[in-house]
Structures are given as structure tokens and as C-alpha cells.
Image: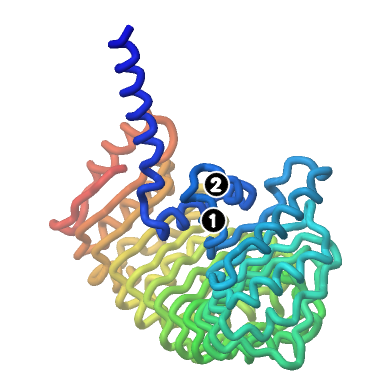
């Protein structure tokens, strides 16, 4: 009996020691861990041990999300927990990150009060997702906070963002705007001109139907992401001499100007079939291709029955391009035009998704070396083919590339489809002749 008690006592001591390992960590580490929890769970940590009693009041990353509330009837209790937590925080502890996501439970009149609380503690990162229909009265302090470095603002579709006359965020470097509508061109101009240190801008699914021109002219801007604008009667003008990354995703517009993008390192462009079917995209396509022509890396995704971006006369010279990732669906055999206009290209990634009949022109002049793009013969060292299924037209592409890439060093094919077919395709690809003696073929 005594032996059993000793064994049980030892087991309890070992268990307690294991459970208290977390308490042995420095406060800074513990605070980083508990800040990842939902707000209600952060408050509950105060009962774990004496040392933990006041730790929750030192949290500098605050996450308020009413999606964590299971039933709407519990909404008042949740809002009371939020306010008790905010009231209990140490007054000398600033706020590094404040995230508020609401729309399901939270009363609209409490939102600006919570935002004001964060602003009063010199918040650096403010992440607001407000899904309340018709919420337009955002706290004025958001537009004048001198400590803000990152601002993410997403509102219910149709909510109107009216930027006040006095707008200045002197230290803001990252701005995300989503699912909102600016009241007019003046609001947009004030918005961007007031961010004098802006380096990264994301505009996602914003409605611009009441605007004439969306103009971004920040000299400090380094990264720009445009996606899914609603409305096609506006113009877009980008003047960003220090821009190094540009992403354009499925955005309709009647006019496009990309001016002085000479520092551009990477461009990512996605054009889907809906855009081609709704507007005459040719003028915008010309401006878009010319605007990114100084890029060193280009990711181009096209899904259309019209070869509008890759037709002679529309494709400019890409004198600096060394990396090209081309994903296509539809009747687009003109992909070689891009290669012909990219004299320095050394890495090519292809992902084709269309029928074999659409590549009939591939073989036209395939034995006439003067029609083979110069970069393919003398510059390209790495080629990757993705989603390869071994269809006849895909095999033609592989054969064309291996017969003309004279300095090719690595040729990688990523197979898709059934395993039995993949084994057969692998043997066929490896058996193809190649003009480059250094070429190593890898099948994935």
C-alpha cells in the first residue's frame, strides 16, 4: 500500500511539473502565445495559476471576432466580455495590433468606441472587417492616427468610404481596402495623397462605378495589388517610379495608364473570360503590356477564346525579362510572340489548358530556325511544363522546345492524370531527342 501511494505521489508530481512548464516561460513568450487565442479564452487564462492572474491585461495584440459567438442570443454577453477586457488592461501597455471582425453580433454603436480605444493606445496595426450593412460612419481618428503603420479596412459591400478633408497618416506603410465604395474622386485623391510613406497598397473588390479616375501616384509605393473592381466606366492611372511588384487580377476598366514603372521587378497579371466578354479590352491590354514591359519576372494568366494580349503589335519588347510564367486556356497559340520579344529570357514556365486543334499553328515553320525565338535558341536554360497530360498537342510543345533550346540545362515536366498513363508519358518524354547536350530531363 505504501509503495502504491509513493508511486501515485510521484506520478502527480511529474504531471504537475509537466503542466507548469508553460508557466516557466518568460512573460513575453507567454503573451505571444495567449494573444493567438480568441478574446474569451484570453480572459479565462487568468484562473490557471496565480502568476497568470494579470497576464491577460498585458496583451498588446487584441483580436475581437464575433464569429466565435455560436448563438446571437449570446451577443450581449460577448460584448460585455470585450468591454470588461478592454477596461481591465494595464494603462501603460500600448496596443501593437488591433483586429476587429464583426457583423453578426456586435451592435454598430459600439464599433467606433472600440476603435477609439485602440487609437488611444497608439495602435500600430489596425485590421477592421465590418460586415454591417450601411455602416458608413467610421471613426475620424482612423484617418489621422500618427502611429498607424498597417491599416486593413474591409466593409460590407456597398458601404461608402468618405475620406475627410483633413486626412494624414504620416507613418502608414501598408494599406488594404476591400469591399467598399469611395464617395468620389476627391476621396480617393485625399486617401492616397495623405499616405506620404505608403509602400504597399491592396485594392480588392472595391466598387468604382461612381468614379471617373482611380489615380495612384505615390513615389514611395513599392507593391501594388489590384483585383476585382466593380464597374467598367472608370480609368486607372498608376504613377509609381519605385514600384517593384504589380499584381492585376480580373479588373475591368475603360482606360489604363502605367507610367514610369522602370523599377518593376515582378508583374502578375490574370485576365479571365468574363472580362473579355463584357468590354473591349484591346486598348487596356496594350497599355497594360506596355506598362509592365520593364519587369524582370512576369506571371501571365489568360483564359479567353481571343488572343488579345498576344497578337502582333500589342506585345512590346521586354528587354529585362528573365523569368516568364505563362498559364493559358483558350485559343492562344501566339505564346511564342512573347518569347520573340524577350531577348534575355532564361527561365520559362508553361501551363497550357486547351484542345489540340488550337495548336495547329505551332508546327508552321517549325523547321525554319529564323522563326524560332532567339531567346529559346541561345538564352533559355530552364523550362518547366505544368499539368502535363500527354495529349498530342502537349507532346508537340515538348518536342518543339527540346529541338530548339540549344543551351537548355534543365527540363522539368510535372505530370497529371492517372498513374498508369503517367508512367507511359514519362518514358515517351525521356525518349525525345534534344538539341542541348547538357539538358537534364526531370519528370515529377
Residue drawn at (69%, 63%) of the image: 129
Q: Secondary structure at mark 2?
A: helix
Find residue 92 and report its horizontal and vertical position in percent. 55, 73
Can residue 225 be seen in the rendering of this structure? no
Q: Pick out the residue farthest to the front.
A: 2
Residue drawn at (70%, 76%) of the image: 253
Residue drawn at (72%, 86%) of the image: 213
Q: Taking 127 as reference, is 158 left or right?
A: right
Could you tell me which quadrant the C terminus lies in?
A: top left
Quadrant in which residue 202 is drawn: bottom right
Q: Which mark is residue 355?
A: none
Find residue 239 and report its horizontal and vertical position in percent. 56, 90
Find residue 304 and report its horizontal and vertical position in percent. 61, 60
Q: Residue under label 1, please give it.
A: 54
Residue 147 versus residue 5: which sits nearer the camera?
5
Could you tell me which quadrant the N terminus lies in?
A: top left
Residue drawn at (71%, 74%) of the image: 116
Measure the C-alpha gap from mark 1 to mark 2. 9 Å
The disc, 1 or 2, on the residue closer to the chain's N-terminal end is 2
Quadrant in which residue 153 is drawn: bottom right
Q: Secondary structure at mark 1?
A: loop
Residue 393 versus residue 203: which sits nearer the camera?
203
Q: Residue under label 2, please give it.
A: 45
Amino acid at each position: 500500500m505504501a509503495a502504491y501511494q509513493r508511486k501515485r505521489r510521484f506520478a502527480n508530481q511529474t504531471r504537475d511539473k509537466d503542466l507548469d512548464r508553460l508557466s516557466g516561460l518568460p512573460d513575453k513568450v507567454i503573451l505571444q502565445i495567449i494573444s493567438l487565442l480568441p478574446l474569451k479564452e484570453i480572459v479565462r487564462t487568468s484562473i490557471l495559476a496565480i502568476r497568470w492572474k494579470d497576464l491577460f491585461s498585458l496583451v498588446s495584440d487584441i483580436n475581437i471576432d464575433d464569429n466565435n459567438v455560436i448563438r446571437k442570443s449570446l451577443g450581449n454577453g460577448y460584448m460585455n466580455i470585450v468591454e470588461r477586457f478592454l477596461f481591465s488592461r494595464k494603462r501603460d501597455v500600448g496596443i501593437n495590433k488591433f483586429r476587429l471582425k464583426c457583423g453578426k453580433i456586435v451592435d454598430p454603436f459600439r464599433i467606433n468606441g472600440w476603435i477609439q480605444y485602440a487609437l488611444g493606445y497608439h495602435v500600430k496595426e489596425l485590421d477592421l472587417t465590418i460586415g454591417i450593412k450601411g455602416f458608413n460612419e467610421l471613426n475620424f481618428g482612423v484617418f489621422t492616427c500618427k502611429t498607424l503603420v498597417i491599416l486593413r479596412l474591409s466593409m460590407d459591400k456597398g458601404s461608402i468610404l468618405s475620406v475627410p478633408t483633413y486626412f494624414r497618416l504620416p507613418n502608414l506603410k501598408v494599406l488594404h481596402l476591400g469591399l467598399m465604395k469611395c464617395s468620389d474622386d476627391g476621396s480617393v485623391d485625399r486617401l492616397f495623397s495623405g499616405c506620404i510613406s505608403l509602400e504597399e497598397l491592396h485594392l480588392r473588390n472595391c466598387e468604382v462605378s461612381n468614379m471617373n479616375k482611380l489615380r495612384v501616384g505615390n513615389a514611395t509605393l513599392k507593391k501594388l495589388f489590384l483585383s476585382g473592381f466593380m464597374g467598367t466606366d472608370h480609368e486607372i492611372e498608376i504613377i509609381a517610379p519605385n514600384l517593384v511588384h504589380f499584381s492585376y487580377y480580373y479588373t475591368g476598366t475603360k482606360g489604363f495608364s502605367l507610367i514610369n514603372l522602370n523599377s518593376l521587378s515582378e508583374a502578375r497579371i490574370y485576365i479571365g473570360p468574363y472580362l473579355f466578354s463584357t468590354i473591349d479590352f484591346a486598348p487596356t491590354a496594350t497599355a497594360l503590356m506596355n506598362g509592365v514591359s520593364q519587369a524582370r519576372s512576369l506571371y501571365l494568366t489568360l483564359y479567353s477564346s481571343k488572343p488579345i494580349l498576344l497578337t502582333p503589335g500589342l506585345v512590346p519588347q521586354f528587354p529585362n525579362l528573365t523569368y516568364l510564367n505563362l498559364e493559358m486556356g483558350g485559343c492562344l497559340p501566339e505564346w511564342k510572340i512573347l518569347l520573340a520579344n524577350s531577348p534575355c529570357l532564361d527561365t520559362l514556365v508553361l501551363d497550357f489548358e486547351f484542345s489540340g486543334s488550337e495548336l495547329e499553328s505551332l508546327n508552321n515553320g517549325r523547321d525554319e530556325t529564323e522563326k524560332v525565338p532567339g531567346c529559346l535558341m541561345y538564352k533559355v536554360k530552364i523550362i518547366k511544363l505544368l499539368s502535363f497530360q500527354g495529349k498530342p498537342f502537349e507532346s508537340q510543345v515538348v518536342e518543339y522546345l527540346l529541338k530548339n533550346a540549344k543551351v537548355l540545362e534543365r527540363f522539368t515536366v510535372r505530370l497529371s492524370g492517372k498513374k498508369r498513363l503517367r508512367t507511359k508519358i514519362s518514358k515517351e518524354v525521356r525518349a525525345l531527342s534534344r538539341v542541348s547536350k547538357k539538358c537534364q530531363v526531370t519528370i515529377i
